[in-house]
Structure formats: C-alpha cells, structure tokens
Image: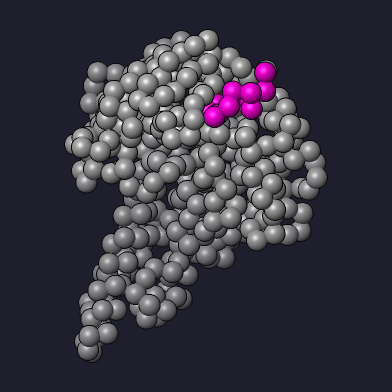
C-alpha cells in the first residue's frame, strides 16, 4: 500500500497544495514551521479520523476558511482508490470513497493504513493512560476497522451513563433528597458491559499479539541494553478465560459492586476507559524511570511494533517518521534505517537532509511556506 497523490485545500497552513508521491522512501525537507508535519498529519487523519497533535478538528482548518478538504489516492495491490474527507468544525465530517459519498466518515477507515511516529509519541511513555489507550485502539481499528464502531458505541454509552450519574450527583448536592432518577442505570450498565466486553477482548488479544514485536523493536533500537515489556492493566479482574461472555459478566459484576462509589462521585469508574497499558524496562515501569533516550526509544519501538504487527497480518501500511533522526545518535540512526528500509512507502520529515541516513535518501521534497517542490 502506498499514497500516490495527496491534495489539501485549506488544511492547516496550506490554502491549496498537491503532492505526487511514489513507493519507496521520500524525504520532506524544510525549516521548522513550514508545514512538513501538516502533510503527515493529513494522511494520518485519513487513516484514523483523528489528529496526533490536537484534540479537536478546528485547528486543522486554515484560518479564515469554513472547511478543509483532504484528498488522497491510495494504491493497494495494483488498484487505485481515492479517499476524500471534508472537515467542518462543529459538524459531522463528510467523506467519499472513489466518487461515492459514504454514510459515515468512519466507513473510509481501512482504505489507508498508516503508522506515524512523531515527537508527541513521547507521551505514550510519559503521559497519561489515555495516550496508551488511544494507541491500542487506533491499532485495533487499523487491524480490524469494525472496531471503530465498537469504540464509538462504547464511548457513547459512557457519555450517556456519566450524564445520568452527573445529574444525580448535582441534584443531591443542591438539596435533592433522592439525588435524581437512576432508574435507567441498569440499562446503561448492560450496554456498557456489552460494548466494553467487545473492546476489552480486542485489546487483550492485541496486547498478546503485540508484546513480542515491542520487545524485538526495542532491542533493535536500543541495541539490547534492557528488555522492554508490555502488559494490560484492566479496571476489573479479568477472568482466567477472557472470552467476551465472561468479560461481559465480569464488567456487570464490577459495575454492581462499585455503584455506590459511582453515584457518590457522579462518574463511571469501571470499564475499558479506565484501563492502562503498562510499559516496563527490565523490572521497572518505564514511566518515571526511563531516561529521555530510553523513553524516545520506547516510543519509537511501540510504533515500529505496530508496523511489524500489521505486516505480519498481511497489511502493508505506509510508515511515516516525523523529525525522528535529529533526536538519535549515529548508531541509532543506522539501526533505525535498517529496520525501516524495506517499507513499501516510507515518508520522513527533517530540517536537515544530512540527518537522514544515505540508505533512505529516495525522492526528496523541499517544503516552504505553502509550497511543496520535488527536487530529486
């Protein structure tokens, strides 16, 4: 799989730009702040319907414009497919596959599979559990796009359940004797257990499959200095045989046991939205103990592991490395080049072309303000 053409209209800093790409390595060179990352962000948005840099869509639309358009032509197994997304802040995005509109934007997921490493990925190691849950869920969707629906359904249930608990909490705080109507809480418990069990089962299966790839990638990047490991930490006690039915029962039991605490605090305390992916180096947790270099290597290993897992599944994703080589010493640069050199399509951004090993110097693009020009 590779992207043959990317077109942007009113996306970030670009009023209008078109870039013709090819399989193999492409290096995007330019000073900081001229829009290199914006190109990768646009492709990442097509792949995940999310930005790795901001939490809302509004910053993606160029100042003064009402909407942004991302259009890319993807080649997979010799077949071309055009994907188009229109981003309208505050409204549902519109999408097309080929020339046909789709009912929901998430129906385009799977048309482009992409693994993107960016400096923000340090938060996978140092940040809150939400960053690591997002990493797992994005990878789940990349492997099996149907999980986008599971994820959306679960998020909707948690939002509705939280609203009910919050209303009860506020009623009690303002002098209500009964604290609001909680008669429908059992219904929302059932929905949360159903969708939560599906999401939790997918994550558990994913972590089992991913763990050896993380260990291998970190060993390669860090030259075998310390062993890296991952484990899933659930907010419930996971049954010995965690099939979906057993997980659903475990979630229902945990919700019943914790109801008084949830009512008291006005928020849902049980479910996959409270879980974490635990990262370790040797016997110690990476968070709080890993040095800057170890954290950087670990974050990179997580992305490389995702890439390798997708390839093992028979999916050949686009691999993008945003400003990574400037952070690495010469040895790590060469080891990374060896690891990624065989990618069907590799996109690399840098401020200084010489930071990128010679083995990855394929097509070269120079980026200026709003302009992308191929020079090699």
The residue nearer to you, when weighing 84 against 79, is 84
Q: Residue at x 33, y 47 (%)?
A: 56
The colour scheme of the drawn protein is one colour
Give the residue displayed 49% in from the left and 26% down from the top. Answer: 30
Residue 352 in the magenta stretch? The answer is yes
Note whether residue 4 is visible.
Answer: no
State the residue in front, 68 or 230. Answer: 68
Picture residue at 58% right of the left edge, 32% below the top: 307
Could you say where residue 252 lies in the image, as x and y percent from the top left? 43, 66
At horizontal 69% and vertical 46% (from top left) the residue drawn is 293
Relative depth, front residue between 3 and 202: 3
Q: Is residue 376 above or below residue 215?
A: above
Q: Position of residue 220 (x, y in %)?
A: 74, 35
Counting from the top left corner in percent of width and height, residue 124 is at: 56, 50
**Residue 295 visible at all:** yes
Region rendered in magenta: 344-358
Q: Is residue 204 left or right of residue 39?
A: right
- In the figure, 267 relative to 28: above or below? below
330 to 137, vertically: above or below: above
């Amino acid at each position: 799989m590779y992207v043959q053409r990317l077109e942007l209209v009113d996306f970030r800093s670009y009023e209008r730009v078109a870039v013709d790409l090819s399989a193999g390595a492409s290096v995007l060179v330019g000073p900081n702040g001229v829009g290199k990352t914006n190109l990768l962000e646009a492709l990442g948005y097509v792949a995940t319907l999310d930005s790795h840099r901001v939490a809302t869509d509004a910053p993606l639309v160029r100042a003064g414009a009402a909407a942004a358009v991302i259009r890319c032509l993807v080649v997979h197994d010799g077949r071309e497919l055009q994907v188009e997304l229109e981003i309208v802040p505050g409204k549902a995005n519109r999408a097309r596959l080929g020339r046909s509109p789709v009912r929901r934007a998430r129906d385009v997921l799977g048309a482009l599979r992409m693994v993107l490493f960016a400096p923000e990925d340090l938060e996978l190691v140092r940040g809150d559990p939400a960053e690591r849950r997002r990493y797992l869920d994005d990878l789940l969707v990349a492997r099996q796009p149907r999980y986008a629906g599971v994820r959306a359904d679960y998020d909707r249930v948690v939002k509705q359940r939280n609203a009910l608990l919050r209303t009860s909490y506020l009623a009690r705080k303002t002098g209500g004797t009964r604290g609001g109507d909680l008669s429908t809480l059992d219904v929302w418990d059932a929905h949360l257990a159903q969708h939560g069990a599906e999401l939790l089962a997918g994550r558990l299966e994913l972590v089992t499959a991913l763990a050896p790839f993380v260990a291998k990638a970190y060993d390669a990047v860090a030259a075998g200095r310390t062993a890296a490991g991952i484990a899933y930490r659930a907010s419930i006690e996971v049954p010995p045989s965690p099939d979906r039915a057993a997980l659903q029962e475990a979630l229902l039991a945990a919700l019943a046991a914790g109801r008084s605490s949830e009512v008291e605090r006005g928020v849902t305390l049980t479910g996959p939205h409270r879980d974490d992916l635990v990262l370790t180096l040797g016997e110690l947790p990476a968070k709080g103990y890993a040095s800057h270099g170890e954290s950087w290597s670990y974050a990179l290993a997580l992305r490389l592991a995702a890439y390798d897992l997708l390839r093992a599944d028979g999916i050949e994703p686009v691999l993008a490395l945003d400003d990574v080589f400037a952070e690495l010493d010469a040895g790590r640069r060469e080891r990374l080049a060896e690891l990624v050199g065989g990618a069907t399509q590799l996109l690399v951004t840098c401020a200084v072309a010489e930071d990128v090993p010679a083995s990855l110097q394929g097509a070269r693009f120079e980026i200026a303000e709003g302009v992308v020009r191929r020079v090699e």
